[in-house]
Amino acid sequence: MSTPWNSPSPATASHKNAATRSVSALGEDFAYRELGPKDGVPLILLVHLAGVLDNWDPRVVDGLAARRRVITFDNRGVGGSSGSTPDTIEAMARHAVLFIRALGFDQVDLFGLSMGGFVAQVVAAEEPHLVRKVILAGTGPAGGPGIDKVPALAIQATLKGALTRQDPKLFLFFTDTAGGRQAGREFLERLKERTHDRDKDISLPSFRAQLKAVKWWGRQAPSDLSAVRQPVLVANGENDRMVPSPNTLDLAARLPHSELIPLYPDAVHGGVFQRHDDFVARVLEFLES
Protein backbone atom coordinates (compact mmCIF):
# COMPACT_ATOMS: atom_id res chain seq x y z
CA MET A 1 0.00 0.00 0.00
CA SER A 2 2.97 2.30 0.54
CA THR A 3 3.46 5.00 -2.08
CA PRO A 4 6.06 7.80 -2.15
CA TRP A 5 4.38 11.10 -1.30
CA ASN A 6 5.29 12.68 -4.62
CA SER A 7 4.25 9.79 -6.85
CA PRO A 8 1.33 10.52 -9.18
CA SER A 9 -1.73 8.37 -8.66
CA PRO A 10 -4.05 7.64 -11.58
CA ALA A 11 -7.57 8.98 -11.60
CA THR A 12 -10.17 6.31 -10.84
CA ALA A 13 -13.80 6.13 -11.76
CA SER A 14 -15.41 4.60 -8.71
CA HIS A 15 -15.31 4.34 -4.94
CA LYS A 16 -15.73 0.62 -5.56
CA ASN A 17 -12.35 0.20 -7.23
CA ALA A 18 -10.21 3.16 -6.14
CA ALA A 19 -6.79 1.96 -5.00
CA THR A 20 -5.94 2.45 -1.33
CA ARG A 21 -2.67 4.37 -1.23
CA SER A 22 -0.40 5.71 1.47
CA VAL A 23 1.54 8.91 2.06
CA SER A 24 4.04 9.58 4.87
CA ALA A 25 4.24 12.71 7.00
CA LEU A 26 6.46 13.12 10.08
CA GLY A 27 6.95 9.38 10.34
CA GLU A 28 3.27 8.44 10.13
CA ASP A 29 1.48 6.87 7.17
CA PHE A 30 -1.92 8.15 6.07
CA ALA A 31 -4.18 5.81 4.07
CA TYR A 32 -6.18 7.49 1.32
CA ARG A 33 -8.07 7.01 -1.94
CA GLU A 34 -8.26 9.41 -4.86
CA LEU A 35 -10.99 9.60 -7.48
CA GLY A 36 -12.05 11.85 -10.32
CA PRO A 37 -10.19 14.19 -12.67
CA LYS A 38 -6.59 15.11 -11.94
CA ASP A 39 -7.01 18.84 -12.43
CA GLY A 40 -8.79 21.47 -10.34
CA VAL A 41 -8.82 22.17 -6.62
CA PRO A 42 -8.94 18.85 -4.71
CA LEU A 43 -11.93 18.16 -2.45
CA ILE A 44 -10.76 16.54 0.80
CA LEU A 45 -13.40 14.52 2.69
CA LEU A 46 -13.30 14.47 6.51
CA VAL A 47 -15.28 11.56 7.88
CA HIS A 48 -17.65 11.16 10.84
CA LEU A 49 -17.03 9.64 14.29
CA ALA A 50 -15.66 6.07 14.01
CA GLY A 51 -15.68 6.35 10.22
CA VAL A 52 -13.04 4.89 7.90
CA LEU A 53 -12.60 4.96 4.12
CA ASP A 54 -15.42 2.49 3.55
CA ASN A 55 -18.00 4.50 5.51
CA TRP A 56 -18.44 7.11 2.78
CA ASP A 57 -21.58 6.65 0.70
CA PRO A 58 -20.43 5.56 -2.77
CA ARG A 59 -23.20 7.65 -4.36
CA VAL A 60 -21.84 10.79 -2.70
CA VAL A 61 -18.18 10.04 -3.45
CA ASP A 62 -18.78 8.92 -7.04
CA GLY A 63 -21.23 11.74 -7.68
CA LEU A 64 -18.72 14.36 -6.56
CA ALA A 65 -15.83 12.61 -8.36
CA ALA A 66 -17.73 12.78 -11.65
CA ARG A 67 -16.60 16.42 -11.84
CA ARG A 68 -14.16 16.98 -8.96
CA ARG A 69 -10.86 15.54 -7.76
CA VAL A 70 -11.99 13.79 -4.56
CA ILE A 71 -9.73 12.42 -1.82
CA THR A 72 -10.90 10.40 1.19
CA PHE A 73 -8.43 9.54 3.95
CA ASP A 74 -8.03 8.01 7.40
CA ASN A 75 -6.75 10.47 9.98
CA ARG A 76 -3.93 9.45 12.30
CA GLY A 77 -4.41 6.11 14.04
CA VAL A 78 -7.68 5.29 12.26
CA GLY A 79 -8.28 2.45 9.81
CA GLY A 80 -5.23 2.01 7.61
CA SER A 81 -3.34 5.03 8.97
CA SER A 82 -0.56 4.58 11.50
CA GLY A 83 0.07 6.31 14.83
CA SER A 84 -2.17 7.00 17.80
CA THR A 85 -5.49 8.76 17.43
CA PRO A 86 -5.56 12.23 19.03
CA ASP A 87 -8.22 13.03 21.62
CA THR A 88 -8.84 16.64 20.57
CA ILE A 89 -10.41 18.06 17.42
CA GLU A 90 -7.60 20.61 17.17
CA ALA A 91 -4.96 17.85 16.96
CA MET A 92 -7.03 16.03 14.34
CA ALA A 93 -7.08 19.27 12.33
CA ARG A 94 -3.28 19.57 12.52
CA HIS A 95 -2.90 16.00 11.24
CA ALA A 96 -5.36 16.67 8.43
CA VAL A 97 -3.22 19.62 7.35
CA LEU A 98 -0.10 17.42 7.52
CA PHE A 99 -1.81 14.94 5.21
CA ILE A 100 -2.87 17.63 2.75
CA ARG A 101 0.61 19.17 2.68
CA ALA A 102 2.22 15.73 2.26
CA LEU A 103 0.26 15.31 -0.98
CA GLY A 104 1.75 18.59 -2.16
CA PHE A 105 -1.43 20.67 -2.28
CA ASP A 106 -1.37 24.39 -1.58
CA GLN A 107 -5.14 24.88 -1.90
CA VAL A 108 -8.05 22.52 -1.24
CA ASP A 109 -11.78 22.45 -0.64
CA LEU A 110 -13.07 20.60 2.45
CA PHE A 111 -16.19 18.51 3.04
CA GLY A 112 -16.60 17.70 6.73
CA LEU A 113 -19.34 15.37 7.95
CA SER A 114 -20.31 15.32 11.65
CA MET A 115 -17.01 15.09 13.58
CA GLY A 116 -15.26 15.77 10.28
CA GLY A 117 -17.16 19.05 10.21
CA PHE A 118 -15.61 20.01 13.56
CA VAL A 119 -12.18 19.32 12.06
CA ALA A 120 -13.00 21.27 8.90
CA GLN A 121 -13.98 24.35 10.91
CA VAL A 122 -10.62 24.38 12.70
CA VAL A 123 -8.63 23.83 9.50
CA ALA A 124 -10.54 26.60 7.69
CA ALA A 125 -9.99 29.06 10.54
CA GLU A 126 -6.32 28.25 11.09
CA GLU A 127 -5.29 27.76 7.43
CA PRO A 128 -7.13 30.48 5.50
CA HIS A 129 -4.74 30.34 2.53
CA LEU A 130 -4.96 26.54 2.27
CA VAL A 131 -8.77 26.23 2.26
CA ARG A 132 -10.82 27.73 -0.60
CA LYS A 133 -14.38 26.51 0.16
CA VAL A 134 -16.03 24.35 2.84
CA ILE A 135 -19.04 22.03 3.00
CA LEU A 136 -20.34 21.24 6.50
CA ALA A 137 -22.96 18.50 6.96
CA GLY A 138 -24.54 17.11 10.13
CA THR A 139 -22.22 19.16 12.29
CA GLY A 140 -22.05 22.11 14.64
CA PRO A 141 -19.81 24.70 16.28
CA ALA A 142 -17.74 24.20 19.40
CA GLY A 143 -19.99 24.42 22.44
CA GLY A 144 -23.09 23.71 20.35
CA PRO A 145 -26.12 22.41 22.30
CA GLY A 146 -26.28 18.63 22.60
CA ILE A 147 -22.91 17.91 20.99
CA ASP A 148 -21.42 16.70 24.28
CA LYS A 149 -24.16 14.02 24.32
CA VAL A 150 -22.92 12.45 21.04
CA PRO A 151 -20.64 9.89 22.78
CA ALA A 152 -23.49 8.61 24.94
CA LEU A 153 -25.81 8.34 21.93
CA ALA A 154 -23.14 6.51 19.93
CA ILE A 155 -22.56 3.99 22.72
CA GLN A 156 -26.30 3.45 23.21
CA ALA A 157 -26.76 2.82 19.49
CA THR A 158 -23.82 0.40 19.45
CA LEU A 159 -25.35 -1.59 22.30
CA LYS A 160 -28.78 -1.53 20.67
CA GLY A 161 -27.24 -2.71 17.42
CA ALA A 162 -25.53 -5.61 19.17
CA LEU A 163 -28.76 -6.65 20.89
CA THR A 164 -30.88 -6.41 17.73
CA ARG A 165 -28.17 -7.55 15.29
CA GLN A 166 -28.56 -4.37 13.30
CA ASP A 167 -26.08 -1.73 12.22
CA PRO A 168 -26.03 1.20 14.70
CA LYS A 169 -26.06 3.62 11.76
CA LEU A 170 -29.68 2.67 11.15
CA PHE A 171 -30.61 4.27 14.49
CA LEU A 172 -28.20 7.21 14.30
CA PHE A 173 -28.35 8.23 10.63
CA PHE A 174 -31.97 7.60 9.63
CA THR A 175 -35.48 8.25 10.91
CA ASP A 176 -37.66 5.48 12.34
CA THR A 177 -40.25 5.98 9.59
CA ALA A 178 -40.99 3.82 6.57
CA GLY A 179 -39.03 6.18 4.35
CA GLY A 180 -36.16 6.49 6.78
CA ARG A 181 -35.87 2.73 7.33
CA GLN A 182 -35.89 2.10 3.58
CA ALA A 183 -33.23 4.76 3.02
CA GLY A 184 -31.12 3.22 5.78
CA ARG A 185 -31.28 -0.25 4.28
CA GLU A 186 -30.34 1.08 0.86
CA PHE A 187 -27.41 3.01 2.33
CA LEU A 188 -26.05 -0.06 4.14
CA GLU A 189 -26.27 -2.06 0.91
CA ARG A 190 -24.30 0.63 -0.91
CA LEU A 191 -21.56 0.42 1.73
CA LYS A 192 -21.08 -3.25 0.76
CA GLU A 193 -20.45 -2.54 -2.92
CA ARG A 194 -16.70 -2.44 -2.44
CA THR A 195 -15.71 -6.06 -1.90
CA HIS A 196 -11.88 -5.98 -2.10
CA ASP A 197 -9.13 -4.00 -0.39
CA ARG A 198 -11.52 -2.82 2.29
CA ASP A 199 -10.32 -0.62 5.14
CA LYS A 200 -9.87 -1.79 8.71
CA ASP A 201 -12.57 -0.87 11.21
CA ILE A 202 -11.65 1.69 13.82
CA SER A 203 -9.95 0.20 16.89
CA LEU A 204 -11.46 0.53 20.35
CA PRO A 205 -8.65 2.83 21.65
CA SER A 206 -9.09 5.11 18.63
CA PHE A 207 -12.87 5.16 19.08
CA ARG A 208 -12.42 6.13 22.74
CA ALA A 209 -10.05 8.93 21.77
CA GLN A 210 -12.57 10.27 19.26
CA LEU A 211 -15.39 10.09 21.79
CA LYS A 212 -13.29 12.17 24.19
CA ALA A 213 -12.53 14.71 21.47
CA VAL A 214 -16.18 15.08 20.49
CA LYS A 215 -17.30 15.45 24.10
CA TRP A 216 -14.71 18.15 24.72
CA TRP A 217 -15.70 19.98 21.51
CA GLY A 218 -19.27 20.07 22.79
CA ARG A 219 -18.16 21.51 26.14
CA GLN A 220 -15.78 24.16 24.83
CA ALA A 221 -16.59 27.83 24.79
CA PRO A 222 -18.56 28.79 21.66
CA SER A 223 -16.30 29.29 18.64
CA ASP A 224 -15.77 32.63 16.94
CA LEU A 225 -17.10 31.59 13.56
CA SER A 226 -16.31 35.00 12.09
CA ALA A 227 -12.75 33.64 11.74
CA VAL A 228 -13.99 31.33 8.98
CA ARG A 229 -13.91 33.67 5.99
CA GLN A 230 -14.33 31.11 3.22
CA PRO A 231 -17.65 30.42 1.49
CA VAL A 232 -19.39 27.59 3.38
CA LEU A 233 -22.28 25.34 2.32
CA VAL A 234 -24.26 23.95 5.29
CA ALA A 235 -26.55 20.88 5.24
CA ASN A 236 -28.38 18.45 7.55
CA GLY A 237 -31.60 16.57 8.11
CA GLU A 238 -34.43 18.45 9.79
CA ASN A 239 -34.35 16.45 13.04
CA ASP A 240 -30.76 15.33 13.64
CA ARG A 241 -30.54 13.57 17.01
CA MET A 242 -26.76 13.24 17.13
CA VAL A 243 -25.69 16.81 16.37
CA PRO A 244 -29.04 18.53 16.90
CA SER A 245 -30.24 20.39 13.83
CA PRO A 246 -30.37 23.82 15.56
CA ASN A 247 -26.57 23.67 15.37
CA THR A 248 -26.86 23.61 11.58
CA LEU A 249 -29.00 26.73 11.62
CA ASP A 250 -26.57 28.35 14.08
CA LEU A 251 -23.63 27.64 11.76
CA ALA A 252 -25.46 29.15 8.81
CA ALA A 253 -26.38 32.24 10.81
CA ARG A 254 -22.93 32.86 12.31
CA LEU A 255 -20.62 32.03 9.43
CA PRO A 256 -19.96 35.25 7.46
CA HIS A 257 -20.24 33.68 3.99
CA SER A 258 -22.62 30.76 4.35
CA GLU A 259 -25.30 29.15 2.22
CA LEU A 260 -27.86 26.85 3.86
CA ILE A 261 -29.42 23.93 2.03
CA PRO A 262 -33.01 23.70 3.33
CA LEU A 263 -33.00 20.97 5.98
CA TYR A 264 -33.96 17.64 4.44
CA PRO A 265 -37.42 16.42 5.59
CA ASP A 266 -37.87 12.99 7.17
CA ALA A 267 -34.09 12.91 7.63
CA VAL A 268 -31.63 13.10 10.49
CA HIS A 269 -27.84 12.75 10.77
CA GLY A 270 -27.47 10.85 7.48
CA GLY A 271 -29.61 13.28 5.51
CA VAL A 272 -26.92 13.93 2.91
CA PHE A 273 -26.70 10.17 2.25
CA GLN A 274 -30.47 9.76 2.19
CA ARG A 275 -30.83 12.66 -0.27
CA HIS A 276 -27.54 12.06 -2.07
CA ASP A 277 -28.77 13.11 -5.54
CA ASP A 278 -29.89 16.55 -4.37
CA PHE A 279 -26.90 17.00 -2.08
CA VAL A 280 -24.29 16.13 -4.70
CA ALA A 281 -25.88 18.47 -7.23
CA ARG A 282 -25.90 21.34 -4.72
CA VAL A 283 -22.29 20.71 -3.66
CA LEU A 284 -21.04 20.68 -7.27
CA GLU A 285 -22.91 23.89 -8.01
CA PHE A 286 -21.45 25.50 -4.88
CA LEU A 287 -17.88 24.42 -5.67
CA GLU A 288 -18.11 25.55 -9.29
CA SER A 289 -19.81 28.88 -8.66
Image: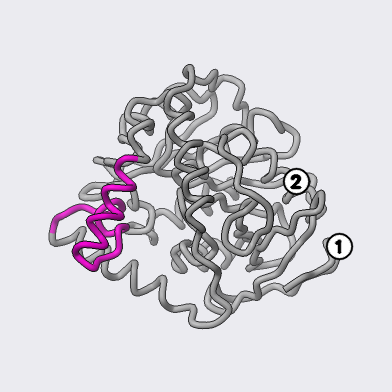
* Main SS class of the magenta portion in the image: helix
Q: Which residue is drawn at the image coordinates 51% and 25% (left, top)?
A: 255
**Spot occupied by residue 65 in the image (x, y as percentages of width and height):** 58, 65
Quick check: 106 above or below 256? Answer: below
> Quick one: label 1, few (<14), some, or many (20+) residues within 10 Å?
few
Q: Residue furthest front?
A: 205
In the picture, measured across the screen, residue 284 lies left or right of residue 18, that is left
Task: Find numbered disc 2 in the image and state the secondary structure of the residue it sits on.
Answer: helix
Q: Which residue is mark 2?
A: 98
Specify which label sits upstream in the sequence, 1 or 2. 1
Location of the N terminus (image quadrant)? bottom right
**Are circles 1 and 2 on residues that touch, CB within 8 Å?**
no
In the picture, measured across the screen, residue 177 lies left or right of residue 242, that is left
> Quick one: label 2, few (<14), some, or many (20+) residues within 10 Å?
some
Q: Nearer the viewer, mark 1 or mark 2?
A: 2
Q: Which residue is mark 1?
A: 6
